[in-house]
Amino acid sequence: MGDITRVVTGGSSAVILIDGVFESGPSVWHKEILLAMRAGVPVIGASSMGALRAAELCSYGMLGSGRIFEDFASRRLTDDDEVAVVHGPAETGWMPLSDALVDIRATVALAAEERIISPAMAHGVIAHAKATYFKNRSLSDSVESVQPQYMPDNEKTQIRNWFAAHAVSQKRNDCVELLRHLPEAISTAAERVAMAAMAKSTAYLRHFNDRAAPRLSGRPS
């Protein structure tokens, strides 16, 4: 909390929010995003914490980007733990120690599409991952937990190897996609901030004309 306020007061012309802490320290505050946009600074969110905040504040002018944002904005996803992971300290490069559920969903969807696993097994993997506390969430553990006991060991090994080689990071994909189109995204976000400010001003003037102006002129409202 406070990082966006600091970069805005420091003169940044745009803010790109990708991720942030939420348990070891205060998370990015909604109000500081609103204050940044009120100051005319466009704010864009994607991937993780950024996708969450963009879905929550898109009606106020924040721009969201990527599949994860779209899933939250459309209410296909609703829980914060979808993007939550536990990670190591700074000296490890913030190495993730668990798997994000949005990434597990993307990997399992690919496996089902390529018929590596059955639809029933795909459903089981997601259900197991969702039921697991986010700090203990692991794609490999969820896959292992739902493999039929009667499945031959060579098939289990093939499935295990496929998941190890084809894991999808939807969080990374959304971040990279935003960076590829960053100039256009900033331009769009700036337009949204301007439109939101104009709408707010128009709403205020409408309220003033309907309520305050008659009273000031002595006319009944």
Image (cartoon, rainbow, N blue to C red):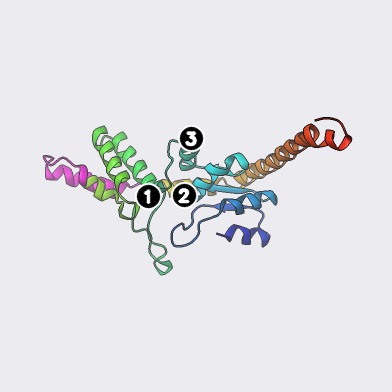
Residue at x-position 30% and y-position 54%: 136
Callout 2 crowding tier (Cα within 10 Å): few <14, some 14–19, many ≥20: many
Coordinates of residue 182 in the picture (x, y in percent): 58, 48
Which residue is denoted by mark 1 in the rendering? 100
Q: Pointer 2 and pointer 1: residues touching (CB < 8 Å)?
A: yes
Coordinates of residue 102 in the picture (x, y in percent): 39, 44
Q: Say left or right for 142 vs 88.
A: left
- Identify the main secondary structure in magenta: helix
Residue at x-position 65% and y-position 41%: 192
Circle 2: element type: loop
Q: Report the residue that reaches farthest toward the right.
A: 217
Q: Nearer the viewer, residue 204 or 126?
A: 204
Q: Say left or right for 166 vs 17.
A: left
- Magenta segment includes 80: no
Q: Report the residue that reaches farthest toward the bottom.
A: 91
Q: Say left or right for 78 vs 60.
A: left
- Magenta segment includes 150: yes
Which residue is denoted by mark 2 in the rendering? 48
Say the numbered circle drawn on residue 172: none
Q: Say left or right for 107 vs 116.
A: right
Q: Pointer 1 and pointer 3: residues touching (CB < 8 Å)?
A: no
